[in-house]
Amino acid sequence: MSQCAEAAAVAATVPGAGMGKAGLRPPMVPRQASFFPPPVPNPFVQQTRMGAARCLQIFFLGIILLPIRALLVALIVLLAWPFATISTACCPEKLTHPITGWRRKISQPVLKILGHAMFFSMGFIVTVKGKVARPTEAPIFVAAPHSTFFDGIACVVAGLPSMVSRNENAQVPLIGRLLRALQPVLVSRVDPDSRKNTINEIVRRATSGGQWPQILVFPEGTCTNRSCLITFKPGAFIPGVPVQPILLRYPNKLDTVTWTWQGYTFIQLCMLTFCQPFTKVEVEFLPVQVPNDEEKSDPILFAGRVRNLMAEALGIPVTDHTYEDCRLMISAGQLTLPMEAGLVEFTKISQKLKLDWDGVRKQLDEYAVIASSSKGGRIGIEEFAEYLKLPVSDVLRQLFALFDRNHDGSIDFREYVIGLAVLCHPANTEDIIQVAFKLFDVDEDGYITEEEFTTILQAALGVPDLDVSGLFKEIAQGDSVSYEEFKSFALKHPEYAKIFTTYLDLQTCHVFSLPKEVPPTPLFASNKVSPENHDESPSDKKDD
């Protein structure tokens, strides 16, 4: 193997890798399995399609069933309210002690019966599998997949355990009183210490030895379409106590329950569900999962094991999507991109690449500018070249190929974020920027003229007639570019850093490929990057 090939092979194993021959695919940065696209691209969308016959059936059944079921639900809620009032009378909104004594003994059995009656009146046929653990066996239930507000049926089947809920929900008339009867762990949005206080309260109750009711947690933190299990939040696993997983299934031919970020609204789902003859739901209680010593000290490890167990029982994959992906998805929609364009498995990407949400959100704005003219919200080679104000050349194709991780000829937002972090930002250090500036500053006067800028880019991209006047004007505030202007532009546009390092790699590869006994011929005029002594050029030397 030649030294040039060896250098390219070594360079290909690190960010800033060297490029291959013109017209060929470049040596690729190794694809870590953890960066592969998720098996389910978008778990936050549900499209339920109904034919004409199904619509007619719903219409005629709805004429009868909808008013009857709505009336029954309202009646049951009214019947439950006085018992909830008895249970919570003279109790503060945020409980410091569990509700015990005669009030709980009277209200709890009645509320359980009314809970079952309410779901039955809505048309739910519930199948329960497994055995419910006692509070001393498993202080915490974890239910998944969380796909609808009807998942509250798990709370009824489990015996009305406490739930984690927003403080605002407890303020809602009628419904708020019913919620308070469950002795919930309330979360405040205005309290900056709310997350810490919530975790402390869960730990306090879970380690009370059965004095408090069990706690039901939906660890996914948001609704999905049940096609996978997304990342489990660690809150339910921080206490380090045994948990009992609860599986939820809705084995119906027509899905009228799934409530995701894209799909039917709350009212529409209620109406569709009430208009069905019946709706099947399966609630399965898996064996209690006891954490080992390592999992007690690492709740994320415990959460991951429980999630994998539940996914295996459900026969579905796991992904690393989180609620933050939902926020990015909504932002993508506001930027006129397809909403799924914002899904990047944020938590995994941010942890591995040391990114924060604000930074990724800013990159989404930049991505939208590039992809605005393309169909489907993806960047092709033409949009990539137009954004960089450079022609489509071999070097640009090689750079594009490094971003295009699945080799489909386009770059989605996830690939864009990974590419910037893995390829461009490591090559955008102060040292690289200084070297790049010196490379352009041929006459070493501390400024880059348009002629110098054009000469180097023409050589770097292999395009002799390249016109970069538009790009130069974007960097320069006058007739030339100072180092501070160059640095500012490079930091704002890290995509160009990879082009600079690619050019330097090509120069290095050229040097390696020369015979050892022949000194390398300089490629450019004298400067600090490519020093040259014209008086001692190889062509002027004579052998004695």
Image (spheres, rainbow, N blue to C red):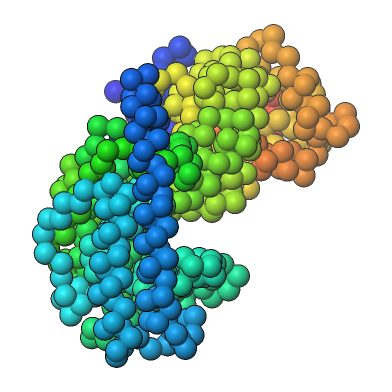
Image quarter of residue 208: bottom left
In this rendering, the answer to whether 116 lies above or below 35 is below
Image quarter of residue 115: bottom left
In this rendering, the answer to whether 23 lies above or below 361 is above
Measured as percent of width and height from the top left, residue 392 is found at: 58, 14
Q: Residue at x 21, y 48 (%)?
A: 125
Measured as percent of width and height from the top left, residue 211 is found at: 27, 86
Q: How many marks?
A: 0
Q: Does residue 126 appear left or right of residue 431 in this picture?
A: left
Measured as percent of width and height from the top left, residue 74 is found at: 42, 57
Return the residue nearer the eye: 98 or 81. 81
For the N terminus, the quadrant is top left
Q: Does residue 457 appear left or right of residue 132 in this picture?
A: right
Q: Residue at x 59, y 22 (%)?
A: 384
Q: Residue at x 47, y 81 (%)?
A: 94
Task: Looking at this view, name the residue that lies furthest to the top.
Answer: 465
Q: State whether residue 436 appears in this view.
A: yes
Return the residue nearer the eye: 247 or 27. 247
Measured as percent of width and height from the top left, residue 293 is found at: 19, 74
Return the residue nearer the eye: 411 or 505. 411
Q: Does residue 528 appear left or right of residue 132 in this picture?
A: right
Q: State whether residue 502 appears in this view.
A: no
